[in-house]
Amino acid sequence: MKINIDISVIIPAFNAADSIGVLVHTLLGETTLSTEIIVVDDGSSDETWTVLSAITDERLILIRQENQGVYAARNTALAIHRGEWVVFLDADDRIAADFLQERLRTAREAQADVALFNARHTDSAGHLRHPVHRRQPYGQTLTGQQWIRHCVSRREWPHYLWLQIIRSAYIREHNLRFQEGKSHKDILWTIQLAAADGRFYFSDRQDYLWVNNPASITHRPDYYDIRAFSYIDVIADILALSTQTQYRAVRRALVRHALVESRHFLGLYRRRVNDRQAVRARFRARIAFRHLVPGVSNLSDAFFLLKLVRNIYLPGVRNTPAAVSQERR
């Protein structure tokens, strides 16, 4: 007998004992639609599994695996999900009480393959701050490739997975899965999601609270180098996508986007990275300067490229304390 499930909610959890229970109970509180909530405990060493195991509800599916990272955890859940739609959440964030119901209604009414929503920044005390994005085509429907060009021209790329509700058939049709790694792979997922050129709808509904958690792994000093290496891989993969025939219509936009991500990388490199020599060597090995040049569209881009050359590409750049101090200014 086929089970009809409206939405599969996929949540990777790593040492999330303090927050995962609240999120799961909020989701289970929505009873007007059929859901499955797949939580993948990705090798937690705290009481995450104990908290989850104490929740008795047939809609909750628990998977426990050795630590492989959030993207591998999402792939694990994608392989078994049964819902018509998919929503990705993070274990430590907060959602509105009617989060799933309203997202499903909006996506169906728009006849979308992917619907994107908005969110608000908040701190751990619950103080609301500014919206996550402001320049999206709210209330409109675009093809995915039109959206890529829109985002690049406005320099706003909302790649966060928890903004999205995606038709499962669209994921399967285009054989979409996450590139496994430590960080920033949601950028690549969203590009491939859009490059497949489905029907995208945009809502300014701010139904998700993005908690700024200074204690998260992404803010740990020993994680900055990992983030830098991940940025390099993402930039190289965006450039590789831009050379593929099926993405010819957005080739220039993809290269421009790679240049934007290079800006983010350089900011991290100049201010946070510890092993600058290894990071610089990896960037030069994976990303040829000439491949970034077509992404230049204004003087700001040109000046940035000069800065990238000075910091990354020029041979014999000293890594003395004085040079590091000068670069970080």
Image (cartoon, rainbow, N blue to C red):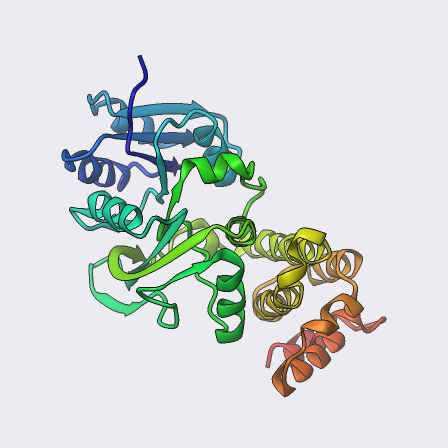
**Which residue sits furthest right?**
315
Which part of the image, by quadrant, shows the N terminus?
A: top left
Q: Give the residue drawn at x 55%, y 39%.
A: 174
**Which residue sits furthest top?**
1
Residue 18: quarter of image: top left
Which part of the image, by quadrant, shows the C terminus?
A: bottom right
Is residue 289 in sight in this rendering?
Answer: yes
Q: Give the residue drawn at x 20%, y 43%.
A: 101
Q: Give x and y (percent) for residue 71.
A: 51, 40
Viewer-side residue, 296 vs 307? 296
Q: Give x and y (percent) for residue 86.
A: 37, 39
Q: Give x and y (percent) for residue 147.
A: 48, 63
In the rendered structure, the answer to whether residue 309 lies left or right of residue 152 reads right
Q: Give x and y (percent) for residue 120.
A: 28, 63
**Does 185 sit above or below residue 141?**
above
Is residue 47 in sight in this rendering?
Answer: no
Number of marks present in the image shown: 0
Q: Give the residue drawn at x 46%, y 69%.
A: 156
In the rendered structure, the answer to whether residue 22 lies left or right of residue 8 reads left
**Does 138 sit above or below residue 1?**
below
**Which residue sits furthest bottom?**
299
Residue 283: quarter of image: bottom right
Viewer-side residue, 108 vs 32? 108
Q: Give the residue drawn at x 20%, y 59%.
A: 126
